[in-house]
Amino acid sequence: MTPTRRYDPVTSHEAEASIADRITLIQQDVLAYARSVHEFIDLDLAAHFTGTYGPSTVRTRRIELVRLGLIRQADWLPGVPKYRTMPPSNRRHIVWQATPTEETAP
């Protein structure tokens, strides 16, 4: 699964190739998922990859992508982190999103 489509501009494919040189195939899968949804929590990520990768594997890859600046924590407002509370524990979970690229930035 790749983040670009065959009809995307050549610059998108070049950008994908430059990232692909720096990240693993699992990281590419996690990044493609992050780019396919507006935002997500680690539970969403683990559910998406059930049967393909384990939850700790995708969380670790997400952490690596955060360190690379390709995924970031979503904000409610500028500088105000976004969390989602999940039942039954009502624990807060950090909401993540793919870092905007030139193609996706508003």
Image (cartoon, rainbow, N blue to C red):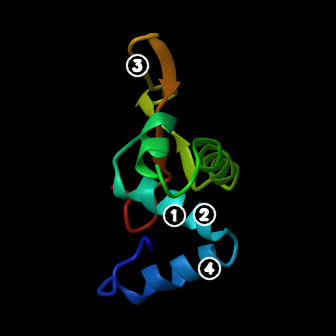
User: For the residue labelled by badge 2, is the local secondary structure a helix, a strand or a loop?
Assistant: helix
Amino acid under label 3?
A: Met
Closer to the camera in the image, 23 or 99 = 23
> Do the residues bearing badges 4 and 3 touch, measured as CB atoms within 8 Å?
no
- Whichever of callouts 2 and 3 sits on the residue coming sooner in the sequence is 2
Residue 94 point in image, percent of width and height? 52, 28
Q: Which mark is residue 18?
A: 4
Amino acid under label 1?
A: Asp
Closer to the camera in the image, 25 or 4 = 25
Q: Which mark is residue 86?
A: 3
Residue at position x 46%, y 84% from top?
Answer: 13
> Do the residues bearing badges 1 and 3 touch, measured as CB atoms within 8 Å?
no
**Residue 77 can be seen in this image:** no
User: For the residue labelled by badge 1, is the local secondary structure a helix, a strand or a loop?
Assistant: helix
Residue 83 point in image, percent of width and height? 45, 23
Q: Residues within 10 Å of mark 3 (few under 14, many from 20)?
A: few
> Do the residues bearing badges 2 and 1 touch, measured as CB atoms within 8 Å?
yes
In this rendering, the answer to whether 12 lies above or below 24 is below
**Residue 11 can be seen in this image:** yes
User: For the residue labelled by badge 3, is the local secondary structure a helix, a strand or a loop?
Assistant: strand
Pointer 1: what residue?
A: 29
